[in-house]
Image (cartoon, rainbow, N blue to C red):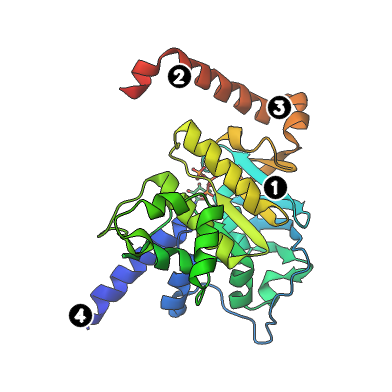
Amino acid sequence: MIQLYIPLNFLGVIYREIKQSLADMERLFSLLEQNREVADAKDAKPLQTHGARVTFSNVEFSYDPKRQILFDVDFTVPAGTTTAVVGHSGSGKSTLSRLLFRFYDVNSGSITIDGQDLRDVTQESLRHAIGIVPQDTVLFNDSIEYNIAYGKPGATKDEIVAAARAASIHDFIESLPDGYATTVGERGLKLSGGEKQRVAIARTLLKNPAILIFDEATSALDSKAEQAIQAELKEIAKSRTTLVIAHRLSTVADAQQILVLDHGRIVERGTHQQLLAADGLYAQMWERQQARKDEELKSPVEEAG
Ligand code: ATP
């Protein structure tokens, strides 16, 4: 019994960790079917997407009944457009993406994709329709080719190379000792944060999902790497419904819609220009961030230390 308990307990811990970080969720779900907190309805149908309009209607949510996290969250991401969510740490941004992926069910209200309630569709079809570029991509101890192909089981080498090129990581891979066969991950070559995100982008390009969730890394990449990732992201977000969970405001200015979350409520919404003109929380956050940037420029030595 104890023998059984330990690995199960261990899996439970890993499950919670990974679930929290949104990393590698598809693989995890296939490994730990029994741990799902939500189940398919008996008559669940495959999700049919036609452009993939995402709507949160009056969503209320709590992980723990004693503490509500989201209050009356109501917004639509029109098909093929980008919505960015900003707000202080703990305001509920990542929770929105966990709900869209249906890690949890809402307490009240609903989430729909092209009019279909997430609770009425099969989880397999839902997860097939959503691609995630997580904050911190987990790489398997396998070849870099395997790690990219994971986005589309059975992908051809040509498809893998095309995805790697589009994610601007092909040249880097070619420069590795064994090229695409190089082992990466914990026991192989360690990739930088930016390189890992590129692998995740290549995976997502192969998967070609109708909906994209981009959970921006909290640890800042250097600004050149960040700009490059932004450019690639823009490319894959084109013609896809995209939700960006933004931890830095510099990356959201182009979004068609920005939602400002504060303690689980949407307190402002609009484009970057509209929100600056409104002179509210977003404008304050923007000003603070600009001031911080100016400070960093003035004292690069301090920052390096
Ligand atoms: P950050 O910018 O720091 O990533 P966030 O805005 O994405 O923050 P969330 O991760 O959505 O915030 O968390 C919102 C609130 O929900 C936080 O107060 C957090 O402590 C709480 N929370 C998150 N995950 C769980 C969980 N599994 N169980 C209980 N509470 C949780």
Q: Can you identify the residue that label 2 sits on?
A: 296
- Is ligand 1 within 8 Å of the beta carbon of the residue shown at mark 2? no
Give the Cα distance between marks 3 and 1.
Answer: 19 Å
Disc 2 versus disc 4: nearer the observer: 2
Give the Cα distance between marks 2 and 4.
Answer: 53 Å
Q: Earlier in the sequence, mark 3 or mark 1?
A: 1
| Image coords of residue 47 (percent x, y) | 70, 75
Q: Are marks 3 and 4 in contact (CB under 8 Å)?
A: no
Q: Which mark identifies residue 3?
A: 4
Q: Secondary structure at mark 1?
A: strand
Q: Can you identify the residue that label 1 sits on?
A: 83
The disc labelled 2 sits on which kind of residue? Glu
> In which quadrant is the C terminus drawn?
top left
Q: 189 or 109: which is nearer to us?
A: 189
221 in relation to 146, above or below: above
| Image coords of residue 166 (percent x, y) | 56, 54
Q: Which mark identifies residue 280?
A: 3
The disc labelled 3 sits on which kind of residue? Gly
- Is ligand 1 within 8 Å of the beta carbon of the residue shown at mark 1? no
Left or right of residue 19: residue 192: left
Q: 276 or 41: which is nearer to us?
A: 276
Question: Residue, x 64% and y 82% (percent of image)?
Answer: 41
| Image coords of residue 283 (percent x, y) | 67, 26
Q: Secondary structure at mark 3?
A: loop
**Residue at the extreme top of the image, as rendered:** 298
Q: Earlier in the sequence, mark 2 or mark 4?
A: 4
| Image coords of residue 276 (percent x, y) | 73, 26
Report crowding for label 2: few under 14, some 14 to 19, many 20 or more residues within 10 A (C-alpha). some
Report crowding for label 4: few under 14, some 14 to 19, many 20 or more residues within 10 A (C-alpha). few
Q: Earlier in the sequence, mark 3 or mark 4?
A: 4
